[in-house]
Amino acid sequence: MLTHLPILQVIVPLMAAPLCLILSRPRLVWLFALITSGLAFLISGLILQQVMASGTIIYELSGWQAPWGIEYRIDQLNAFLLLIISAISTVVLIAADTSIKQEIPAEKQTYFYILYLLSLTGMLGIVATGDAFNVFVFLEVSSLSAYALISLGKDRRALWAAFQYLIMGTIGATFILIGIGLMYQMTGTLNMHDLSIRLPAVEHTRTVFTAYAFVIVGICLKLALFPLHLWLPNAYAYAPSIVTAFFAATATKVAVYLLIRFTFSVFGLSFSFTAVPLQILFLVFGLLGIFVASTAAIYQTNVKHLFAYSSIAQIGYMIVGFSMTTITGLTATLLHLFNHALMKGALFLALAAVMYRIGRVQLSQFQGLGRQMPLTMAAIVIGGLSLIGVPLTVGFVSKWYLILATLENGWWPVAVLILLGSLLAVVYVWRIIETAYFKPLLAGSGTIKEAPLSFLIPVWILVIANIYFGIDTRLSVQVAQSAAQSLFGVGL
Amino acid sequence: MITGLFNDWVVIVLMMIGFYIVIAHGNLIKKIVGLTIFQTSVFIFYISMANVKGGSAPILAEGIKLYSNPLPHVLILTAIVVGIATTALALALAVRIKEAYGSIEEEEIQKKDNLDC
């Protein structure tokens, strides 16, 4: 059983998705989905433990030897990502039943859970697999279910957002497909490990260069790296609240993983950063992303929009860490990956609770909420502080490592810019705090009750994780550091 | 140069036509058509990549020694399925958008959205 963990990680949610149809009663389906996701979480925990203890796990699908068959290759980076995704998915699902009841019509609720599980399958698959074409397939599994999930939003703008995301997402995925094809043309293999061995021999050719360009641009579209982020704000703002919480915490992380995997492992460090001036490009786009998106966030009137823009800014931080091409820089990126999932998971779930009680998340509706929904608002405040990077929260840990990495490279102007970017975060988080705590309650809104426990429990699990991992950084830093080291070491 | 790489040129031309339609047209159906052309060009790229000069279909039979590489064909079967799913989903969304907005023109939808805000 234990030797089959890598495939079980993917196949359990995949098999569970169609089974939801048989159960048909929304509440039962919810429970079933929750158990499935919990199981995936358990599996990913076991995998991480196994990887940390005994190194990379290689699993050959149905016994076909790689590079002929598909293999799943799970090292520290994969295991770390699997854990983040399945953990967030499980925590978010706890609140799903209550939230979905209000936002999605009863007859569509079963389909919601099916799509949710398929999307989870896709993300886990992208991370687990060691085959380049398999990545494309799982990418489409998760993306197609994502488009459908977003279109379930109450507002008609959700449809338009889903359509725009579909166009952009498909172009991105097709770019990746072209890149994989070109790589196959040059090397005759699709296995990532095999590719990394065979590519150096042909790396001076224009074909490989083109393949690289297609893959990177495709991934950056999925990643919502500034200036390819246009699909993200509306998609996050109009999707059902639960979907936003799930995607904001996981979807872009998977794309960051792909970027790291392709640049560091498949194409190799020396090619990736010499063929294209990637370092300077990513540094500039990352920093621009931080400033443009944070500034845009300040002017939003819809709080979901506000945090969506803040997500783009946070991706900017990850890319800046990535652009340093040092172990500390990559550690910062991986840490921020984990930490940002915790922050945004908590924030968007808290917003889901506000949505549940008020039905809207316009900033003006937040007036006086600090006293009406004290626990939910406190969660938003702590999440916001973490976003800024206040000590004792996870945000501080990742910013600390990021600044450490910039100073290590001697890029002190970048360090200054990162700190300035955090100041912008102070502004947009303060706008929410000010409205919620220092303005009188909206006239005629009556009394608003605190969110039900089904929201408060998952929100506070994530908030406490935000503080816990901000103080006790052993687990997250150790895993991120060893993953970064192995990426700089012998490669895959 | 041109005759030797005929398929590649076809692929590039189709790809650019598809890409251009997606970007330039405001009509959602036209966008979907463009997206499909764009994806199809990639299918042709994979299929022509697998071709071996003088090779026959990869079938186990007497007298067949030289055959085309079947792997890209199989890969592209998967990609075609993905493409169909994408097109179907995009069309379904277009129907829903038409119901909700009464239009499938990007500009009009954008205008109605701006009125809502």
Image: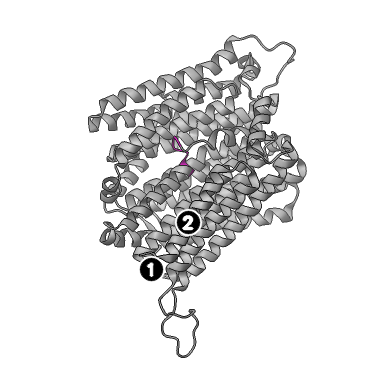
The N terminus of chain B sits in image quarter:
bottom left
- Queried whether the magenta region covers residue A224, the answer comes back as yes
B34 is higher (above) or lower (below) than A361:
below
A328 sits to left or right of A370: left
Which of the chains bears the disc numbered 2? B
1 and 2 marks on the same chain: yes
Q: Identify which residue, B99 or A362, lies in the foreground.
A: B99
Q: Is residue A213 magenta?
A: no
Residue A428: percent from the left, percent from the top?
50, 20
Residue range highlighted in magenta: A222-227
Q: Amino acid at mark 2?
A: Val
Quarter assignment of residue A206? bottom left
Disc number for residue B13: 2
Identified at 54% across, 53% down, the residue is A140
Q: Main secondary structure of the magenta part?
A: loop
Which residue position holds label 1?
B4
Residue A372, horizontal then vertical, whole percent = 66, 17
Give the residue drawn at x 41%, y 82%.
Answer: B66
Q: Amino acid at mark 1?
A: Gly
Please tell me whether mark 2 sits on a helix, a strand or a loop.
helix
Would residue A294 be found to the left or right of residue B21 on screen? left
In the rendered image, the vertical position of residue A446 relative to residue A230, given as above or below: above
Q: Residue at x 42, y 46 (%)?
A: A217
